[in-house]
Image (cartoon, rainbow, N blue to C red):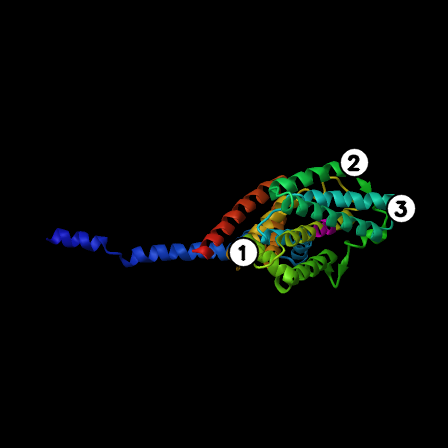
Amino acid sequence: MSTALDEEQLQQPTFINKLVPRIGRIATISLGKYGALIVLALLVVLFALASPYYLTPTNVLEILNAAALSGIISCGLTIILVSGLFDLSLGYLASCSGILITHLMGLGVSWPLAVLIGIASGVLTGLVNGFLVTRWHINALVATLGTGSCLVGINYVISGGAPQDVSENAGFASLSIGHLLGIPKLVYYLVVIAAILWVILNKTDFGRNIQACGGNVEAARLAGVRVARTITLGYVVVGVCAVITGALVASSIGSGQVTAGDSFTLSSFAAAFLGSTVMREGQFHIVGTVVGVILVSAGFNGLALLGVPAYAENLFSGLLLICAVAFSSLGRSLSQA
């Protein structure tokens, strides 16, 4: 009889048996909701211990300056990710727009007009992507990858693969080089563009509509949302942000380079997915994306200070993207639980 009682006691949940799943759930929720912030804090601590120069004011400003360009294009990407779609052409568009703008300047076009023409090309690319996805119903990954491949071809047609030097144009260089009140100009661009996109996403009918599309596209359509127009406009926003990034890259390095913006595709997706684990449990939002961009930049900067070879950045970006998608998926599953 005592044996039966012992077995019954063993089957009853103990305090430890109750506590372990609870701790595991708390840890899981923390990763889903604060994953990017946790990773950022760990990186800062590790690199600060490894290098005395990491947390100096000069290096912190350098991290923010390096994050600015990726931040602009990543915030644009966030708009279309909110709708549940993707854009793989943005990095190639940044490269192509940089080549286009600097090539036009080489032909004698003033840099403000060249930049405006570049922005128009971003709008056109966005319209094409939107048309392919919403009217021809091509999968967004396939459509934007195809558009990106076309942009690579256009890039080489314009440049012949050669850099487009504009280093002697002081006005264009001043667009991105220099400081205001001790802060790099590029940081101001990021702050302004991120603020504008935050307002658009959270305080306008377009923002509410694109969030509705991301939640349930059929429900949004039944509610009166013009889905095709909303998604197309989202792609236009991505295109404009990609062109702005390409122009600022060209201004920073003094020339248009055929592959200058290609790497932004991977880094921007990593930043956006990491950002979705900041306070929102798997939901894309502008503030989170900015945090994600700073995380990526902080990692790159720390690796550079430690003398790690530049090719390790690709490994770091890939690992971050994997972790970011895992955290984001975790956050979504928790929010639906």
Instruction: Where is residue 182? Give x, y as percent.
Output: 73, 61
Mark 3 or mark 1, whichever is nearer to me: 1
Q: CA distance from mark 3 to mark 1?
A: 51 Å
Marking on residue 157: 2
In the image, residue 156 lies at what x, y percent?
76, 36
* N-term-proximal mark, 1 vs 2: 2
Local packing at callout 3 (Cα closer than 10 Å; few below 14, some 14-19, many 20+) is: few
Residue positioned 70% across, 45% down in the render? 128
- The residue indicated by pointer 3 is 108
Q: Quarter of the image holding residue 288?
A: bottom right
Q: Indicate left or right for 66 with 292 as reference.
A: right
Q: Which secondary structure dominates the residues rendered in magenta?
A: helix
| Disc on res. 261 | none
- Label 1: which residue? 219
Relative depth, front residue between 239 and 291: 239
Is residue 40 visible in this depiction of the protein? Answer: no
Separation of disc 2 and disc 3 at Cα? 19 Å
Residue 202 relative to residue 186: left or right: left
Please report the bounds of the magenta region as a residue range.
240-246
Residue sticking out furthest to the left: 1
| Amino acid at the residue labelled 3 | Gly
Does dot 1 land on a helix, a strand or a loop?
helix
Q: Earlier in the sequence, mark 3 or mark 1?
A: 3
The crowd level at tag 1 (other Cα within 10 Å; few <14, some 14-19, many 20+) is: few
- The reply to whether dot 2 and dot 3 touch (C-beta < 8 Å) is no
Residue at x 67%, y 62% (from the top left corner): 195
- Residue 59 lies within the magenta run: no
Residue type highlighted by circle 2: Val
The amino acid type of the residue labelled 1 equals Ala
Residue 92 in the figure: left or right of residue 114:
left
Q: Nearer the viewer, residue 27 or 127?
A: 127
Q: Nearer the viewer, residue 315 or 264?
A: 264
